[in-house]
């Protein structure tokens, strides 16, 4: 793909911005080797993630759901942040106010060094008790010791610390994300199809509140229509170029 020029007006908006917000989706991690959701490579043993990532699937067969998550965790354990993740770390360093809202559960933004990260769909490296104690903690072991499903010290089943289809997003995290979106001067939409609500609506909230919205995605998405600027390019090449242009313009 030939490189598209970085729009000067987008660079200028980023240089002037008091508040920068970035919304990322699965495409952000594609160049780290993580499959996106809405493509055939996202399938697991013939199942669509949507069939396994539900409270009902967990009630019916917690072992199978954990096998799926253990497979994903083991796969992700070998993946590293890409140049796009690192460019966002740099953007946070140079921006006055910066909020990174991610739909990704892979934790790669944190591994890269991003600090103000709102994980609206949770984090696959966290586990939560489904019983009385409701405890939640990080567990980075991959694969998890057998037998699955893992259990809490209180003996109840543990579940992955992610949001499943049909569940609400963590209220406080989503509130912070909504507030940041309303206050954004520039809102970057990176690597998301915009197919899953309410996360996708944050870009519309930002646009309605007057933010300059820009999309980075090699393909069109449901959020292309709200984006004033569009870079049809992968995140790992577009973001470093964009951030380098902002740094150059700041002098
Ligand atoms: P999708 O799989 O729906 O969309 C991935 C997007 O990334 C597509 O628009 C691709 O064109 C784009 N893409 C692919 N490669 C890219 C690259 N190198 N750089 C930039 N973009 C690229 O993933 P999401 O929009 O993240 O929910 O899906 C949203 C939610 O649906 C996920 O968080 C997950 C899923 O079900 C939960 O887990 C609750």
Image (cartoon, rainbow, N blue to C red):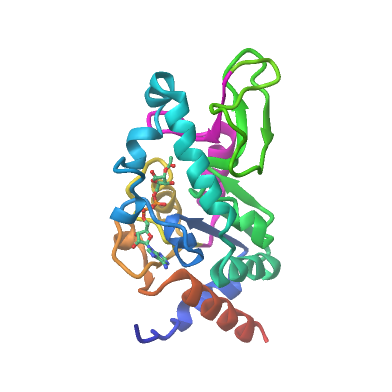
Q: Residue at x 39, y 46 (%)?
A: 201
Indicate which quadrant contains ligand 1.
Answer: bottom left
Left or right: residue 90 versus residue 12 is: right
Q: Position of residue 226 (x, y in %)?
A: 34, 60
Question: Can I make out residue 121 in this image?
Answer: no
- Magenta stretch contains residue 161: yes
Q: Residue at x 65, y 62 (%)?
A: 112
Which portion, as a residue range, is magenta?
A: 157-186
Q: Quadrant of residue 94?
A: bottom right
- Compared with 122, 151 (above or below) is above
Q: Residue at x 54, y 28 (%)?
A: 148
Q: Quadrant of residue 119?
A: top right
Q: Residue at x 40, y 40 (%)?
A: 198
Q: 46 or 31: which is nearer to us? A: 46
- Compared with 236, 69 (above or below) is above
Q: Position of residue 178 (x, y in %)?
A: 51, 44
Question: Can I make out residue 156 in this image?
Answer: yes
Image quadrant occupied by the N terminus? bottom left
- Compared with 123, 229 (above or below) is below
- Magenta stretch contains residue 122: no
Q: Position of residue 35 (x, y in %)?
A: 41, 57
Q: Position of residue 101 (x, y in %)?
A: 54, 51
């Amino acid at each position: 793909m030939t490189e598209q020029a970085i729009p000067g007006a987008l660079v200028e908006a980023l240089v002037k911005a008091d508040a920068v917000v970035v919304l990322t989706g699965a495409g952000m991690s594609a160049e780290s080797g993580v499959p996106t959701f809405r493509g055939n490579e996202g399938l697991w043993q013939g199942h669509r993630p949507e069939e396994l990532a539900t409270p009902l699937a967990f009630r019916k067969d917690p072992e199978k759901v954990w096998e799926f998550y253990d497979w994903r965790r083991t796969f992700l354990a070998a993946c590293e942040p890409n140049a796009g993740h690192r460019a966002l770390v740099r953007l946070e360093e140079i921006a006055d106010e910066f909020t990174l809202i991610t739909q990704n559960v892979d934790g790669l933004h944190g591994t890269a060094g991003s600090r103000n990260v709102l994980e609206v769909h949770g984090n696959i490296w966290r586990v939560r008790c489904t019983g009385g104690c409701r405890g939640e903690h990080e567990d980075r072991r991959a694969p998890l010791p057998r037998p699955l499903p893992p259990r809490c010290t209180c003996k109840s089943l543990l579940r992955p610390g992610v949001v499943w289809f049909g569940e609400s997003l963590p209220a406080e995290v989503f509130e912070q994300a909504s507030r940041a979106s309303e206050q954004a001067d520039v809102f970057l939409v990176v690597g998301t199809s915009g197919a899953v609500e309410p996360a996708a609506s944050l870009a519309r909230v930002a646009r309605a509140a007057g933010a300059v919205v820009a999309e980075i995605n090699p393909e069109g998405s449901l959020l292309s229509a709200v984006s004033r600027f569009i870079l049809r390019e992968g995140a790992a090449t577009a973001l470093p170029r964009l951030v380098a242009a902002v740094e150059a313009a700041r002098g």
